[in-house]
Image (cartoon, rainbow, N blue to C red):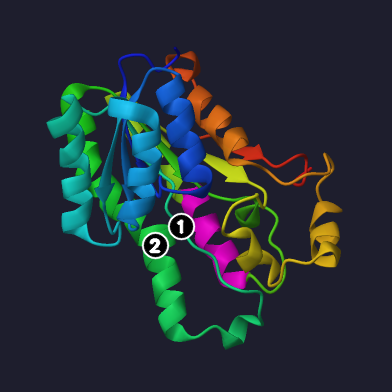
């Protein structure tokens, strides 16, 4: 029960890594707002976990939705201790000059602007209470970029730098900021990264991961739980690889 008494908001909590984080947090005693653009997916996860999880539809690229999402934590559970900025997207492998501008805008809005909007709203709340934990979902793509994913790589590099910068600025206020860098995982986004899901393409990806498997939502949930718990009270500004050794 490492998160007993804590209240968390997890964006993109309806599937993939976000769902893994939500499930682990509830198992460890937290009460969680499951925020997702897909309300049905969020409700499915929340209902499977009982009253300790509440679903809300949120477009995290829109300021009013971000505020409503954080307000929901106060309304349902009486406060907020942890914000996990997990929502994100990728793009199909392609030459960097061929990604359409509209898709670039959508990618950057979801992977970067959403974190700006969330921190703009949550930091005053955390400062007022003298504590809080922020966890951002970055990627090994921001550390060791893969070719033909240039703009996804760049967006996750932004998340890593933003995490470190915010950690330094917010530490005097008792606010910790960390990130996770997962390798490609068994989530709905996997096919996007690979371009196609075939045994040959999977084997090529797996060959770059020393432990020989993709990451799972449970792997990310476990790492997130530690970084957001009081056991990690001396850890801030860390971007932890959960990657089976890929970035070594």
Instruction: Report the residue at 49% width, 19% height from top.
Output: 232
Instruction: Report the residue at 46% width, 57% height from top.
Output: 88
Measured as percent of width and height from the top left, residue 69 is found at 22, 45
**In the image: residue 238, left or right of residue 41:** right
Depth order, front residue of 235/36: 36
Depth order, front residue of 104/174: 104
What residue is shown with label 1?
Answer: 88
- Residue 236 seen in render: no
Q: Main secondary structure of the magenta part?
A: helix
**In the image: residue 119, left or right of residue 48:** left
Instruction: Report the residue at 24% width, 29% height from top.
Output: 80
Depth order, front residue of 22/95: 22
* Quarter of the N terminus within the rendering: top left
As for residue 26 lying within the magenta part, the answer is no
What residue is shown with label 2?
Answer: 110
**In the image: residue 239, left or right of residue 175:** right
Measured as percent of width and height from the top left, residue 33 is found at 29, 37
Q: Quadrant of residue 163?
A: top left
Whole-angstrom CA distance, mark 2 to mark 1, is: 6 Å
Q: Residue 142: which numbered mark, if any?
A: none
Badge 2 vs badge 1, beta-carbon distance below 8 Å: yes
Q: Residue furthest left?
A: 75
Is residue 139 depicted above or below 195 in this figure?
above
* Quarter of the C terminus within the rendering: top right
In the image, the segment drawn in magenta is 150-161
Q: Secondary structure at mark 1?
A: loop
How many other residues sit within 10 Å of disc 1, few (<14), some (14-19) or many (≥20)? Answer: many
- Residue 188 seen in render: yes
Measured as percent of width and height from the top left, residue 97 is found at 60, 86
Mark 2 or mark 1, earlier in chain: 1
Q: Secondary structure at mark 2?
A: helix
Q: Quadrant of residue 62?
A: bottom left
């Amino acid at each position: 029960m490492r998160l007993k008494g804590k209240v968390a908001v997890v964006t993109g909590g309806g599937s993939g890594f976000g769902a893994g984080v939500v499930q682990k947090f509830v198992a460890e005693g937290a009460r969680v707002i499951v925020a997702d653009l897909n309300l049905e997916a969020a409700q499915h996860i929340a209902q499977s976990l009982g009253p300790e999880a509440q679903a809300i539809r949120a477009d995290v690229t829109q300021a009013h939705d971000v505020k409503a999402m954080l307000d929901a934590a106060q309304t349902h559970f009486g406060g907020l201790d942890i914000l996990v900025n997990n929502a994100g997207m990728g793009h199909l492998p392609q030459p960097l000059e061929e990604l359409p501008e509209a898709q670039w805008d959508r990618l950057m809005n979801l992977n970067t602007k959403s974190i700006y909007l969330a921190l703009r709203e949550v930091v005053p709340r955390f400062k007022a209470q003298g504590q809080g934990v922020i966890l951002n979902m970055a990627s090994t793509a921001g550390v060791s970029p893969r070719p033909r994913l240039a703009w996804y790589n760049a967006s996750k590099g932004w998340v890593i730098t933003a995490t470190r910068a915010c950690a330094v600025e917010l530490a005097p206020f008792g606010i910790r900021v960390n990130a996770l860098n997962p390798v490609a995982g068994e989530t709905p986004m996997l096919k996007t990264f690979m371009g196609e899901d075939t045994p040959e393409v999977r084997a090529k990806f797996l060959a770059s991961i020393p432990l020989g498997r993709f990451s799972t939502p449970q792997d990310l949930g476990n790492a997130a739980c530690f970084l957001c718990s009081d056991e990690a009270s001396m850890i801030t500004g860390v971007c932890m690889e959960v990657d089976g050794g890929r970035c070594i």
